[in-house]
Image: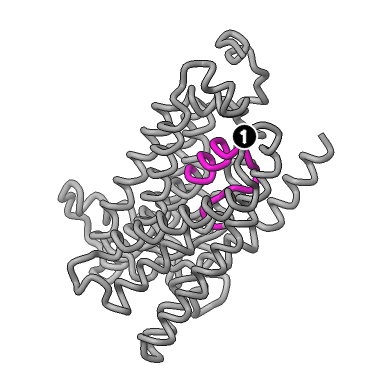
Amino acid sequence: MSGAALAMAPRRRRVPGLWLGPLLLALAILAGAAIGETRLPLSTVLQTLANHLWQAGYPVDRIDAGIVWSYRLPRAIVAAACGAGLALSGLVLQALLRNPLADPYLMGLSAGASTGAVLVAVAGVGGGAITMSAGALAGAMAAFLAVVALAHAVSGGSGGGRATRAAAAIILAGIAGSQMFNALTAYVIARSANAEEARGLMFWLMGSLSGIRWQDVAPCVAVTVLGTGLCLWHRRGLDAFAFGADAAAALGINVRAMRGLLISATAAMVGVLVSKVGAIGFVGLVIPHAMRFLAGTRHDRLVPASAFAGAIFLVAADIVSRILVPGQVLPIGVITALVGAPAFAAILIRGAGR
């Protein structure tokens, strides 16, 4: 397929303007800082931000200021970074593997990252010389390699007429790998953690932002910004992969190098994010599909649209997790599943109808 044909590929309906993304995200973060177990006026949030950023000197109650600045604001920022990173990870995996069901959760990346983080935090692997983020990264890479090896063995390779079979095999291998690493995580927790640690870790594994502080903001934002930039840099290649690896190679793209780079970057991003907030499902699966309906299939618009939508979605899910049950904070993965599963079912039904 020629470059002209690729450029003339049909586009879906466009979003009104990607400039809405930063505005809606800023509003979502402000809402995340104002809404919670104790509701605070938006004016208190804005005055607290002004006091910390510009030494404005507004009279704000110290307890309210501490809730906003030390607890809710970093939590909202990390939720936004994780939502964007997970959505981009799903987008990249779906494009490179040409499988609409590919996402970090189903592919076992989240489960592998959880295993690596738990091995470092609970079992003491590395003797304190390895951080949880490094352990999660190693676990995510190990999970992906295991899934690819199993899928290759099942499908007998992915060339020629075996592409459809390979696409199905890698999802089945991802489910098997995810269950295996989840079992390993549970075994490590049961073997090495006491009752209180086990309860906290099981809550964290379902997705939790409760322990987020300002020191967690920088790594989450950094990997998400770098991941977004990398996806935008390779947007043409991701467009080409929509027509298959052979078409991408015919357009002069080094298929193996690009696939290896982007999947490694995806595993690194998932590893860092999971080490901070645990395994959160459905963000990487649902958001890219929803954005394809709104922004089209061209990745120059799809990448930023997915990043902003994922960020806003996870901030909103975190707000709901804090207010849905009075006096109790739910794991954020529960909220994303409650919203994501019906949404994905609707997307599947609509896609089948079209």
- Provide residue 141's location: percent of width, then percent of height: 40, 54
Q: How many marks?
A: 1
Give above or below for 277 relative to 313: below
Report the amino acid beneath label 1.
Gly
Quadrant where the C terminus sits is: top right
Q: Residue at x 25, y 62 (%)?
A: 60
Dot 1 crowding, Cα within 10 Å, few <14, some 14–19, many 20+: few
Q: Is residue 188 magenta?
A: no
Residue 229 locus on image (x, y percent): 36, 33
Q: Residue at point 65% right, 21% down?
A: 11
Q: Which quarter of the figure has residue 8?
A: top right
- Of residues 86 and 336, the one drawn nearer to the viewer in this rendering: 86
Residue found at x 38% / y 89%: 196
Q: Residue furthest top?
A: 4
User: Please, is residue 70 above or below residue 170 in the view?
Assistant: below
Taking the magenta stretch, the answer to whether it contains residue 93 is: yes
Classify 180 as above or below 95: below
Between residue 122 and residue 280, name the one nearer to us: 122
> Which residues fall within the magenta stretch?
88-105
Q: Position of residue 216 (x, y in %)?
A: 28, 59
Q: Is residue 131 left or right of residue 143?
A: left
Residue drawn at x 34%, y 70% as measured from the top left: 211
Q: Quarter holding the N terminus?
A: top right
Which residue carries the number 1 mark? 159
Residue 117 in view here: yes
Q: Position of residue 238 (x, y in %)?
A: 51, 29
**Left or right of residue 52, residue 89 in this image:** right
Which element type, helix, strand or loop, lies under badge 1? Answer: loop
